[in-house]
Amino acid sequence: MAHTATEIAAAVQRGTLTARAAVEQALHRIEQTQPAFNAWQVIRRDAALAEADAIDGRDDRGSLPLAGVPLAIKDNIAVAGEPMRDGSLATSAAPRTTDHEVVRRLRAAGAVVVGLTRVPELCVWGATDSAFGITANPWDTGRTPGGSSGGSAAAVASGAVPIAHGNDGMGSIRIPSACCGLVGLKPGHGVVPVGEAQTSWGGMSENGPLATTVDDAALMFSVMADDPDAATLIQPSALRIAVSTSAPSAATPVARAWAEAVHRTGDLLRGGHLVRSATPRYPASLMTTTALALWTAGVAADAHASTQVSLLERRNRVHVRIGDVVTRRGLSNPGGRELWRQRAFDFFADTDVLITPTLAQPPIKARRWGERGWLTSLVANARYAPFAAPWNMIGWPAMNVPAGLDPHGRPVGVQLVGKPGSERTLLGLAAQLERFQPWPRTAPGDALRPPR
């Protein structure tokens, strides 16, 4: 989209742009890009135009923070009048009767939901494919846009909408943001409403924004968190910043482009901040026993609450069976989680922000991963995206910030992590990086090049 969410809202508030015109532009771009990228599960053409007209008719639109902004919602939270398929034929196709609280807040702020975006089945995996098709990365159609908020990332990176909703239980905002060159924020635990306990993966999943600019991410986050002050970016100074390229799992190699992005980012921040090289003491079992237990048990609880398990993809039926065993045997206990939480607090005793790569390797191929085995999917995901999940396990805020391009012209990104309550610090630091090293807001026009 040509304009940012902040620009669209300001223009609609002033009356120099109508919400209808902004939504029509988004719908036109969706029509252009959907055949190539398959980002959208539902396109709400008539409903979105009617909602835009309602915004234009409001006398108070000048006070709406997201007045007339076209918005995508990930297809795993409720949008009234639309089904919530969660990437699966095992879910109900009946329309939802009420909005999720996050959707309600966004609509109350003047945003217009133009559609719902694709996800992998039950949002389990870091690549977006399902019975509804394969979603492609607008930067390189042979690669995944990540997951599970891959449809939202592709919708924003293709220029269809300026902002999109996502959620993140093991990296599902940060991974697709990194794959698609976007700003993506996973708030800390309890900052943004989540939903039912059984669908939040044991408290690991959080709702947050994907955007092309830090301003837009902060604006959307402020609405989702019901914290208007968060839309105003602070300018942090003299932060104690640690940079690390060591993956949480020792055997995971990190590609040169992603490691170099971290070192380049650290160099940009020297002078205004105290930057050092340091790595948290990740427990040896963190990405095996602890992560696997929490992940499988969380997915199993979600599946039993909302699906006919027998209709799931084979790999996800395996995932649920493992989660059932973990739950029955009490293996998802908080012991490993609490050890990691204490080590994280120890590390951050003299650190304000940790910077790591967001991914260890480039995005994996866009293919029907659902037709492959559980172990194949697990290995592919673990190898390319190990850096995000540790911070879900303890509920700390973290975000992806674009940090250049790799030798193939694909985005690379860095992850910023802070202690609980540091969302505004992370956004402020991201805004500094945006000034130091601006990034292209969307994928280039020649993105439909042959797959690699």
Image (cartoon, helix red, strand yellow):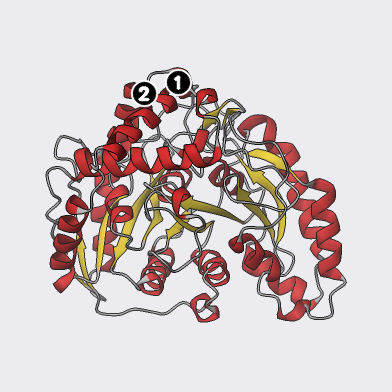
x and y, in percent, of residue 10 in the image: 70, 74
99 left or right of 144 in image: right
Is residue 372 shown above or below 395?
A: above
Q: Position of residue 174 (x, y in %)?
A: 41, 50
Residue 68's quadrant in the figure? bottom right
Question: For the residue labelled by badge 1, is the local secondary structure a helix, a strand or a loop?
Answer: helix
Mark 2 lies on a secondary structure that is: helix
Residue occupying the point 43% across, 38% down: 409
Disc 2 target residue: 374
Residue shown at 53% from the left, 72% from the top? 222
Numbered circles on residues, count: 2
With respect to residue 30, does 226 lie above or below?
Answer: below
Say which amino acid is labelled 2.
Trp
Left or right, residue 181 beside residue 34: left
First in sequence, mark 1 or 2: give its number.
Answer: 1
Query: On screen, 178 above or below 215?
Result: above
Residue 145 seen in this snapshot:
no
Q: Quadrant of the C terminus?
A: top left
* Residue 432, position as x, y percentages in the image: 39, 70
Question: Where does residue 229 sit, x and y in percent of width and height?
Answer: 51, 81
Proximity of marks 1 and 2: CB atoms separated by less than 8 Å: yes
Determine which residue is flagged by label 1: 314
Towards the viewer: 392 or 277: 392
Residue lying at 41% horizontally and 74% vertically, measured from the top left: 424
Q: Amino acid at mark 1?
A: Arg
Which quadrant would residue 405 be assigned to in this image?
A: top left
User: Real-space Cα distance between discs 1 and 2?
Assistant: 8 Å
Mark carried by residue 16: none
- Residue 187 image-quadrant placement: bottom left
Viewer-nearest of discs 1 and 2: 1
Asked if residue 57 lies left or right of residue 160, the reply is right
